[in-house]
Image (cartoon, rainbow, N blue to C red):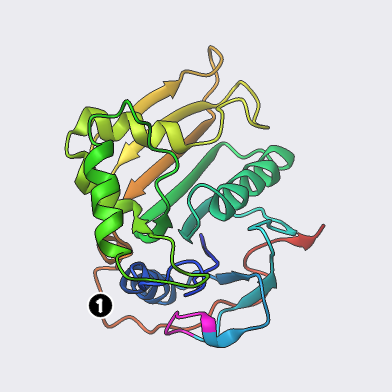
Amino acid sequence: AALILTHASVSFDPRYATKPGVDAATVMARRRQMPVIYLEEAETPEQYFAADCEPDYRIYSEEGELPIDLRSTDVHVAGGHLELCLKRTVQDILASWSRHPAPRLQMTFLMDAIYSDGSALRKSDPYNEMAQRFMSVVGYGRSGPTSWAKLTLLETLGIIGNDERRYDYLQRILPPLEYGLPAAYRVELQLNDAPPRILRRGTAGSSMLLRFRFVDSAAQLMPADADAAPGAAADGQLGFSPL
């Protein structure tokens, strides 16, 4: 397993909305001895707010691109920007997986550690007006290049309120199911510990599975032994090579 943290920066999340979630994610990764990868777009370390300043890998990534050939089959993603940079990270993870198919793949979205500008919302959504009002409140009085309002993915689901609408929204923000992966894969969507929902059945007789799992927070994924030694992962555990 691995944790990939995309652009956890005050430049994009000016109200530090995702900082508690980001810090929970890195603590969880350390306790589970998962490699921690930071994707950063500028040489301005003071803008990055993760409490853990010593990731196993720190990679320059201007738009969320993942310039490594990733072979981890269990990837946790955090940071943002849900509709832009994180979307690019997710697409590049899927591209790596398409080059190295495995029987079971899982991508876990840590929702309190992901920020969004709400651009995936639609005017026709019954919760859109409430979401826009929320963003206008949290962005009130801000000025300058970081003035645009952001909310976390977890806050978005709180605004949506209805489980059926939540699943509809989460499916909306995923890449197209045909993106790079063979049709043999059964694709599932899971919200926290609820039974997974099937998005695509895959080809008959195939046992290959891709699951997109959305969890409220990495705090839910802490090992039972809370005193487990953090310990950084050893080099090579990820199994990747530069592209």
Q: Residue at x 38, y 37 (%)?
A: 121
Question: Magenta span covers which residues?
Answer: 47-52
- Residue 180 x %, y %: 68, 32
- Residue 181 x %, y %: 64, 31
Secondary structure mostly seen in magenta is loop
Q: Nearer the viewer, residue 19 or 71?
A: 19
Q: Nearer the viewer, residue 4 or 235?
A: 4
Q: Let me know if residue 221 is in the magenta part.
A: no
Considering the numbered disc 1 on the image, is that residue within a helix, a strand or a loop?
loop
Q: Is residue 59 visible?
A: yes
Q: Nearer the viewer, residue 132 or 197?
A: 132
Relative vertical location of residue 140 with respect to residue 225 in this rendering, above or below: above
Q: Is residue 192 visible?
A: no
Q: Quadrant of the C terminus?
A: bottom right
- Left or right of 74 in this view: 111: left
Q: Quadrant of residue 14?
A: bottom left
Q: Residue at x 61, y 25 (%)?
A: 178
Q: Residues within 10 Å of mark 1 (few under 14, many from 20)?
A: few
Q: Residue at x 58, y 71 (%)?
A: 38
- Residue 214 x %, y %: 35, 46
- Residue 239 x %, y %: 69, 61
Residue denoted by label 1: 226
Residue type, numbered disc 1: Ala
**Residue, far right:** 243
